[in-house]
Amino acid sequence: MADTPWKLSYEGFDPTQEGLREALCTLGNGYFATRGAAEESEADDVHYPGTYLAGGYNRLETELAGRRIENEDLVNLPNWLALTFRPEGGDWLNLRRVEVLGYTQALDLRQGVLERTVRVRDREGRETSIASRRLVHMRRQNIAAIEMRLTPENWSGIAEIRSALDGRVINAGVERYRQLNGKHLAPLGTREPSEDAVLLLAETSQSRILVAEVARTRVYRDEGPAEARRATEHEEGYVAQRLSVAVGQGESLTVEKVVALCTSRDRGISEPTQAAMEEIGDTGRFSDLLASHALAWRTLWDRGDIVLDGHPHRQMVLRLHIFHLLQTVSPNTVDMDAGVPARGLHGEAYRGHIFWDELFILPYLNLHFPEISRELLLYRYRRLPAARRLARSAGRRGAMYPWQSGSSGREESQVLHLNPRSGRWTPDNTSLQRHVSLAIAHNIWRYWQTTGDRGIMAAHCAEMLVEIARFWASMATWDEAGGRYRILGVMGPDEFHDRYPWRDEPGLDDNAYTNVMASWTLRRAADALDDLAPGRRAELRLLLDVTDEELADWKRIAGGMRVPLLEGGIIAQFEGYDRLEELDWDAYRARYGDIQRLDRILEAEGDTINRYKASKQADVLMLFYLFSAQELTDLLATMGYDFDPATIPANIDYYMRRTSHGSTLSRVVHSWVLARSDRARSWELLTEALESDLLDIQGGTTAEGIHLGAMAGTVDLIQRGQTALEFTDHTLSISPCLPEAMQGVHLKFLYHGYWLHLDVGCDEVTVTAPDGWAGPRRIQVRDRIHEFQPGETLRFTCHLEDGWRPQQGAPERTGRAEGVAESVRRQPNDASPGQGR
Ligand code: BGC
């Protein structure tokens, strides 16, 4: 189907694609989400109608490979979609048992509505068209609704409609977890609270979250209620209403199912059953709900849209990414104490756990929805005691956040990993990725820089920074021989390497990314304390027992941290990297085609990826992603390294050739770091990253949940990467360098509480502050700083032929100041070092 910038559309029913479509057509509101499964479907080899609550976890034990293991999962809640029909005496709708005469499906991103039209012919030759629309309400977080319009095309008689709540569901959405116990829900009862409604109550078996769902089903004919005979079926964990309605040929019946889902995690309620009844009692027709829902989406798009000129398809995908991000975390998430799961609320991969992916997600939220970023930081703050315990259990001080986090903040990483290629369960050491704490520190700092939120810094974030810094100080060991501090036995972001081939115990030494980030964090923690008001600083130092000696230690460790190097100014991924073998990439590509998961390929061959210079994803290159060339050069200088930014392209090239992109995050980072030095390749990687979930380039993983880090990362890549939008030292700088294929980008963003509009075209950049402006008063475009006053518009013109070189005079101004024109030129391919900004 032709792309429109606001619709993801599919034509035809394709069972092999259904899982993927379900994930991509998920509807959610940051409180809960439901996969885009067909209303009539049940979990089988084609469909998987999952519903997940933000923060709705439960633990279960399983006996596996002779061990007792425990896993915490985001629970698949009772299926509220269940709505189907049959002509009296016929079969309930099942697209695999009828002739499908027509099928379209579309996700309307602007309004947050999933639409489907189906025309079917059953075995008796009866043709019926079914058009459904669905929403998960963006403002009324507990409400969802389906409207289904049935039209018998060549028959008349009784149409039977079945509308159910199905709590018999289990977690079975990911094939490789199916050996694990997946029964998280215990049924507590069903009821029929009114003639047109049914109610189901269930509880998660260990975390004891009560879940109440109420479904009200009504049928309309020509806008008036249609007379229906009703019967209710109760089974354990299941309740359904059957409605029998007479219908004539060519006549349409409209079925409306409105559902309220409440849980004992809700705020402002007495208990969920009563809350769900009250919620449902407060709803009108589908069209009313749609109007208020669409309005809520309108306000979100007004804040968060990013407009791309001339690319209807890319525009749609970019919006799809923003859409799914805002369905996973939204203003409804505030106060829910839920983090942001790496795979959204869209499927069961990684069990709904929270990793370091916030690092790729917060930059977008900071600039459009800082209240959500704040909530995600608070999710971490509330788990600071657990992180302290984790550090202590590892013999360290401070706070060690878990690699995978769920309800309580304890380490949720699995201990065994199934390689689907070999069928073997192997030890999973990924929890050695202690760098997750560094990502949290970085997120705190970037949030602080863009929002200037002193309140959260004083109340929560400074404490987290101190405890994270303290942890890293306790991780550092002094190496007398090398005269430097070292960090031993960890894993970097590249998950292919979890140990040395020559060592028994897992972990690597001096992962460069970790060491540099640890040094940065130690300094930021001290800065954060310095920035606090004296009273609060004294309080916090007293409460956390931060002595002058400790601060001096931090400084010494930060300045003396080791960074391993290879020849030619290449930063080594870790100590000993040079001893690894080169992999014959061409041979593996020729043999296997898709080599993204080289780790699994090699394990299945009886070999190990640990022997080779081969990375799953960006590791060293993360440094160029998170820091500008200048920031990194300065940072390394404080560590005693004379880093030459001219070596950045060589570093990128070195690791680029040794990376399989087995994580969807990898292309985002690579595209970013190439944005200046190789715009064509950067654009290629960006387009691949944009398509990675849409086309399921990992072959089956998207059906198990979207990759939210990559989705948000691509949005940020356009928002900050391609525009080089940076916030430093009270100066906001912009240095656009759009790829040739990108004609223009338009967005607005929030900086310290004020909105700025940014329009970047091929030959013009416009910055506007329509509603006042707190500062910074200076805006840097490329290498030139301009004063910027509230209410002003700054317009810079550029000429493609030879770069953004400011000419004499000031930029054109409108607003209060007098307009003076300035030309700023852009060159086709910037020669500055390979830097994302
Ligand atoms: C990546 C991690 C990421 C996780 C969750 C893994 O495949 O290697 O970096 O945090 O997926 O998205």
Image (cartoon, rainbow, N blue to C red):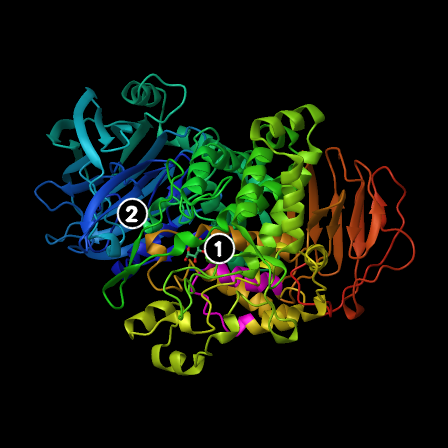
Q: The C terminus appears in which quarter of the rendering?
A: bottom right
Q: Is residue 794 visible?
A: yes
Q: Quadrant of residue 192?
A: top left
Q: Can residue 328 be seen from the camera position used here? A: no
Q: Is residue 149 above or below residue 229?
A: below
Q: Does 658 lie within the magenta span?
A: yes
The stretch in magenta equals 655-673
Q: Quadrant of residue 370?
A: top right
Does residue 514 appear left or right of residue 822 in this picture? left
The numbered mark at residue 37 is: 2
Foreground label between 2 and 1? 1
Ligand 1: quadrant of the figure: bottom left
Q: Secondary structure at mark 2?
A: loop
Depth check: 590 or 769 in front? Answer: 590
476 vs 225, nearest the viewer:
476
Depicted 494 relative to depicted 440: above or below: below
Q: Magenta span has 493? A: no
The amino acid at mark 2 is: Ala
SS class of the residue under badge 1?
helix
Residue 106 % position (x, y): 39, 50
